[in-house]
Amino acid sequence: MSYFIEQHIIQTIQGELTVEEVFTYAYHFKNGLGSQRQIGEQIESVTGRLLLKAEVLSRQFRHLSGGEMKRVVIGQELMGLQAPDFIFCDEPVSGETLLFSS
């Protein structure tokens, strides 16, 4: 199983949704129904793996930085209970993200 993450992510996610809503919808799409506990645990796991702070969950997608947006898009692919073998990313991080992370 593999996924492809596009470069132009702003066109693929409704900007008014919060990050938590994006992840919740992704969970339902990939896994069907689940309990609030299961969804919450998966969201916590994914945000931790992507080094996203908990306060990002309540922010609207359109108000995120470019690097945060890209991590959220990757995160929605990781919301499946079965992890993909490969994720192909078209520019997975911006140059600014790399510059400021060191």
Image (spheres, helix red, strand yellow):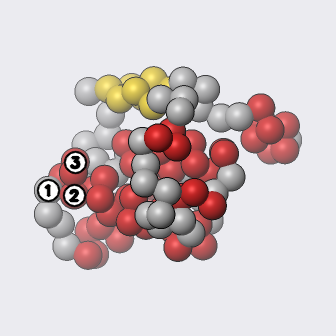
Q: How far from the left and from the top, in percent, is residue 79?
A: 34, 51
Q: Please report the residue visible at 45 percent of the width from the left and 31 percent of the height from the top.
A: 5
- In this figure, which residue is indicated by the disc labeled 3? 30
Real-space CA distance between mark 1 and mark 2, rounded to the nearest whole angstrom: 5 Å
The reply, left or right, for residue 81 in relation to residue 15 is left
Q: Please report the residue visible at 71 percent of the width from the left and 34 percent of the height from the top.
A: 94
Tell me which corner region of the image, top left, top right, bottom left or bottom right, holds residue 59: bottom right
Query: Residue 28 shows which numbered tag?
Result: 2
The reply, left or right, for residue 57 in relation to residue 82 is right
Q: Is residue 64 above or below residue 73?
A: below
Q: Please report the residue visible at 22 percent of the width from the left and 48 percent of the height from the top.
A: 30
Dot 3 amino acid type: Lys
- In this figure, which residue is indicated by the disc labeled 1? 32
Q: Is the Cβ of the residue at disc 1 closer than 8 Å to that at disc 2? A: yes
The reply, left or right, for residue 51 in relation to residue 36 is right
| Number of on-image labels | 3
